[in-house]
Image: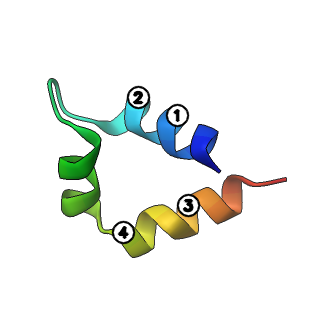
Amino acid sequence: MVDAVIAYYKENAKPQERLGRLIDRIGLDWLHEFAEKAMP
């Protein structure tokens, strides 16, 4: 699950944006759903 979150962060973070800010911007629930879908 951590790998999925990191991959999403690398693809979608704004320049110099930290993970916490990304989560604030997109929402923790959405990120959790994304990570669950990425799990095999």
Mark toward the start of the polypeptide (2 vs 4): 2
Q: Residue furthest right?
A: 40
Task: Give the CA separation, mark 4 to mark 3.
Answer: 10 Å
Left or right of residue 3, residue 17 in this image: left
Inspect the image, locate mark 2, and give the three-letter code of the amino acid beneath it. Lys
Q: Quadrant of residue 11?
A: top left
Q: Residue at x 62, y 38 (%)?
A: 3
Instruction: Look at mark 3 in the image and give the residue it sits on.
Output: 34
Q: Residue at x 20, y 61 (%)?
A: 24
Number of residues whose C-alpha sits closer than 10 Å to that of mark 2, classed few (under 14), some (14–19) or many (20 or more): few
Left or right of residue 24, residue 6 in this image: right
Mark toward the start of the polypeptide (3 vs 2): 2
Q: Residue furthest top?
A: 15
Instruction: Look at mark 1 in the image and give the residue it sits on.
Output: 7
Q: Nearer the viewer, mark 4 or mark 3?
A: 4
Mark toward the start of the polypeptide (1 vs 4): 1
Whether residues under marks 2 and 1 lie with C-beta atoms below 8 angstroms apart, the answer is yes
Left or right of residue 39, residue 2 in this image: left
Residue 6 image point, x, y percent: 49, 36
SS class, disc 4: helix
SS class, disc 1: helix
Mark toward the start of the polypeptide (1 vs 3): 1
Residue 39 image point, x, y percent: 76, 54
Task: Give the CA separation, mark 3 to mark 2.
Answer: 14 Å
Number of residues whose C-alpha sits closer than 10 Å to that of mark 3, classed few (under 14), some (14–19) or many (20 or more): some
Inspect the image, locate mark 4, and give the three-letter code of the amino acid beneath it. Leu
* Number of the label disc, if any, that sits on residue 28: 4
Instruction: Look at mark 2 in the image and give the residue it sits on.
Output: 10
Q: Is residue 33 above or below residue 21?
A: below
Task: Give the CA separation, mark 1 to mark 4.
Answer: 16 Å
Task: Give the CA separation, mark 1 to mark 3.
Answer: 11 Å
